[in-house]
Image: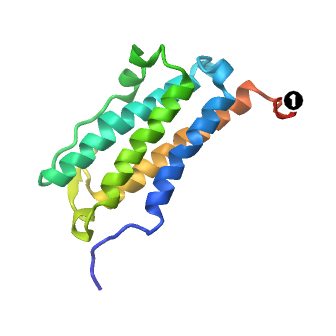
């Protein structure tokens, strides 16, 4: 039996779906997108963070893992980048659309990989050597984590949902 790891065949669909719900969740908090319940990140900041992570972390790291031998991947300060104001004028809806478009680019790269490429590795900022299959699962869990957080923000800000459905 080979020690080679190949991803679950449904991984590409799951990666796409992990951010597909972000547009729906963002729309739920559109009118209160900049509120920070309990001082935590706002819904707008979560979606901007997803966009930044996809464009400035995941895509460049994937490229390096495919083109370099065991690259050491630099730490990325999510709090510093989430305070980045370049997206402050963009609506949460526009950001969510961009997140989905950028994730699709990542998925297209992953779909094109050979079995050997899935085994390529890099050194994650915590010092672990990880392969591209692990990386893809990390991107999946990250998208889902923020999708769930957006739903939690909605639950906290809007305790009565039915009136919106009845309009």
Residue 12 as seen in the image, left or right of residue 135: right
Q: Which residue is mark 1?
A: 163
Residue 34's x, y, as percent? 59, 17
Viewer-proximal residue among 13 and 53: 13
Displayed quadrant of residue 75: top left
**Residue at left offset 81%, top offset 32%:** 161
Residue 2 as seen in the image, left or right of residue 144: left
Displayed quadrant of residue 8: bottom left
Where is 131 relative to 151, above or below? below
Residue 109's x, y, as percent? 30, 53
Disc 1: CA contacts within 10 A as few (<14), some (14-19) or many (>=20)? few
Where is 2 relative to 24, above or below? below
**In what quadrant of the picture does the C terminus appear?**
top right
Residue 71 as seen in the image, left or right of residue 22: left
Q: Residue furthest left?
A: 69
Residue 2's x, y, as percent? 27, 81
Question: For numbered disc 1, what is the local secondary structure?
Answer: helix
**Residue at left offset 53%, top offset 38%:** 146
**Residue at left offset 20%, top offset 51%:** 65
How many numbered callouts?
1
Q: Residue furthest bottom?
A: 1
């Amino acid at each position: 039996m080979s020690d080679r790891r190949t991803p679950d065949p449904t991984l590409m669909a799951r990666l796409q779906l992990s951010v597909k719900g972000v547009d729906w969740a963002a729309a739920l908090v559109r009118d209160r997108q900049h509120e920070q319940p309990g001082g935590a990140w706002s819904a707008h900041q979560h979606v901007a963070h997803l966009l930044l992570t996809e464009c400035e972390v995941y895509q460049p790291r994937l490229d390096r893992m495919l083109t370099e031998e065991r690259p050491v991947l630099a730490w990325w300060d999510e709090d510093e980048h989430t305070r980045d104001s370049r997206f402050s004028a963009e609506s949460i809806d526009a950001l969510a659309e961009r997140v989905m478009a950028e994730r699709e680019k990542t998925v297209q790269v992953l779909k094109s990989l050979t079995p050997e490429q899935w085994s390529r590795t890099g050194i994650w900022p915590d010092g672990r050597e990880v392969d591209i299959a692990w990386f893809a699962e990390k991107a999946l869990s990250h998208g889902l984590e923020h999708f769930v957080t957006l739903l939690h923000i909605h639950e906290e800000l809007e305790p009565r949902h039915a009136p919106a459905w009845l309009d």
